[in-house]
Image (cartoon, rainbow, N blue to C red):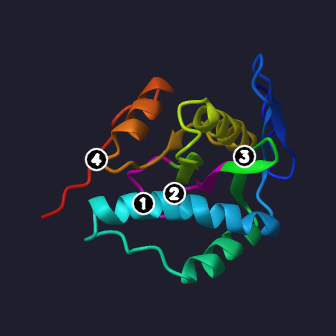
Amino acid sequence: MRPSHRQGTSSREHRGKEHSLEIRKAQEQDIDAILELNRQIGEIHFEQAPQVFCSPSPEERVFLLAAIAAEGRLFCVAEQEGAVVGFLTARIDINETIPFLCKEPICRIGTVVVDEGRRSQGIGKALIAHCDEWGKGHGAHQIRLEVMSFNERAKALYEALGFKMLSQTMVR
């Protein structure tokens, strides 16, 4: 796959007999599918870490619509057979205030979610590849993300894509 650098364009991936997968900029009309995907990931996170996550709420629509409209960030969806089957959000962070941290741009992934019925089909991999190209197009030489310790499936995907543990957040 050769994803595009810009959020406003899209990339396609073809795999044998499977239908093509398109990674494109999220649009306002995608909101219902995005909300369903967000509900899927939100319920799991709330069940596993209720001290961190709230149960899904109606306020998410306004939040996600604002994120879709935000400039300077990546909010892309994976579309297959006319259906939104995943999404990814990311931003570019540049340290400008802490003297002992690197100053290079970092692509920071906020959320990656794939429909629970379409996992293990390369959709997450395609979303992250698109994000990687977007980040490079914005000067980032590194991608960072956080993953909850209970999310073994996501950790396995990230490790398979070359991500390594850099730090841990501990709570009590």
Task: Identify the residue shown where x is 67% and y is 69%.
Answer: 67
Q: Which mark is residue 95?
A: 2
Specify the farthest residue to the top: 16
Stretch of the chain drawn in magenta: 86-102
Q: Is residue 127 magenta?
A: no
CA distance separating discs 4 and 2: 26 Å
First in residue order: circle 4 vs circle 2? 2
Sequence order check, earlier mark of 2 and 3: 2
Q: Which residue is mark 1?
A: 98
- Residue 97 painted magenta: yes
Measured Cα–Cα span from mark 4 to mark 1: 28 Å
Looking at the rendered structure, the kind of residue marked 4 is Ser
C-alpha gap between disc 4 and disc 3: 30 Å
Quadrant that contains the C terminus? bottom left
User: Residue 149 bears which disc, if any?
Assistant: 4
How far is the residue under mark 2 from the one under mark 3?
Answer: 15 Å
Residue at which label 3 appears: 138
Secondary structure of residue under mark 3: loop
Q: Depth check: 11 or 96 in front?
A: 11
- Decide which of tag 4 and tag 3 comes sooner along the chain: 3
SS for callout 1: loop
Q: Quadrant of residue 72?
A: bottom right
Circle 4 residues within 10 Å: few <14, some 14–19, many ≥20:
few
Q: Position of residue 107 (x, y in %)?
A: 59, 47
Is residue 45 rendered to the left or right of residue 19?
left
